[in-house]
Image: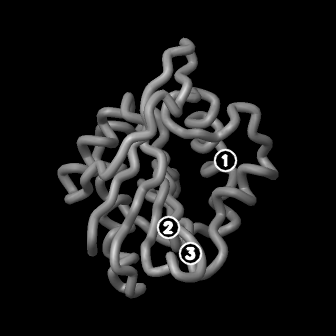
């Protein structure tokens, strides 16, 4: 698997993954009716951030966006979001992208990484982030509505770099 920076030619495959994940409505706080135009504007990071793809040959298995969590006085803390195609889950794609994001943030001089909204029901992601050194520093109760109407908390997760 190769992880590299996103190029415009990657967008059709990235959009397929973003649409798949967003429509499922069980991990991301994005509107399931998100249009392709809105998705691209939201997912493709402008500098100083970066968007990357995880590839198997020319097939995009996953994508991530990485950059400052907040501007100005908060710009020393990075954030990242990760999406893996359903067909590629369980193959280490997510872990490889998180490790890439942590390394990228270190090289850019960030002091820490923070995830602002990890659905507590997304146990696979929560456990992966914990194994990679993140801790839950708070949970907003019932802040995420699953497709079945059940509400679960959104974790804020953090680790120093």
Tell me the element at label 3.
Answer: loop
Identified at 21% across, 57% down, the residue is 132
Residue 66, image x and y in percent? 50, 67
Q: Where is the N terminus found, in terms of image quarters?
A: bottom left
Q: Can residue 152 be seen at all in this image of the molecule?
A: yes
Secondary structure, mark 2, is strand
Q: Are marks 2 and 3 in contact (CB under 8 Å)?
A: yes
Horizontal relation, residue 50 to residue 137: left or right: right
The residue at 44%/71% (across/down) is 78
Q: Is residue 35 left or right of residue 113?
A: right
Compared with 113, 131 (above or below) is above
Mark 2 or mark 1: name the one nearer the start of the chain.
Answer: 1
Check the picture and name the quadrant holding the C terminus: bottom left
x and y, in percent, of residue 16 in the image? 64, 42
Q: Nearer the viewer, residue 72 or 105?
A: 72
Residue nearest the viewer, comparing 51 with 143: 143
Residue 126's disc is none
Color style of the picture: one colour
Which mark, residue 15?
A: 1
Q: Between marks 3 and 1, how big is the CA–CA gap?
A: 19 Å
Question: Which disc number belongs to residue 49?
Answer: 3
Crowd around label 2: few <14 · some 14–19 · many ≥20 (10 Å) = many
């Amino acid at each position: 698997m190769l992880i590299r920076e996103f190029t415009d030619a990657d967008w059709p495959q990235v959009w397929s993954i973003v649409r798949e994940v967003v429509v499922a409505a069980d991990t991301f706080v994005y509107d399931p009716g998100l249009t392709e135009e809105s998705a691209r504007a939201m997912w493709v990071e402008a500098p100083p951030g970066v968007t990357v793809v995880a590839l198997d040959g020319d097939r995009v298995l996953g994508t991530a966006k990485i950059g400052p969590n907040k501007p100005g006085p908060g710009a020393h803390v990075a954030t990242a979001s990760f999406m893996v195609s359903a067909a590629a889950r369980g193959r280490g794609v997510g872990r490889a992208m998180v490790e890439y994001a942590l390394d990228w943030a270190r090289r850019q001089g960030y002091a820490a990484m923070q995830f602002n909204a990890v659905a507590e029901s997304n146990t696979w992601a929560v456990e992966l982030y914990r194994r990679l050194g993140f801790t839950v520093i708070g949970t907003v109760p019932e802040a995420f509505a699953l497709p079945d109407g059940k509400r679960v908390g959104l974790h804020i997760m953090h680790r120093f770099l």
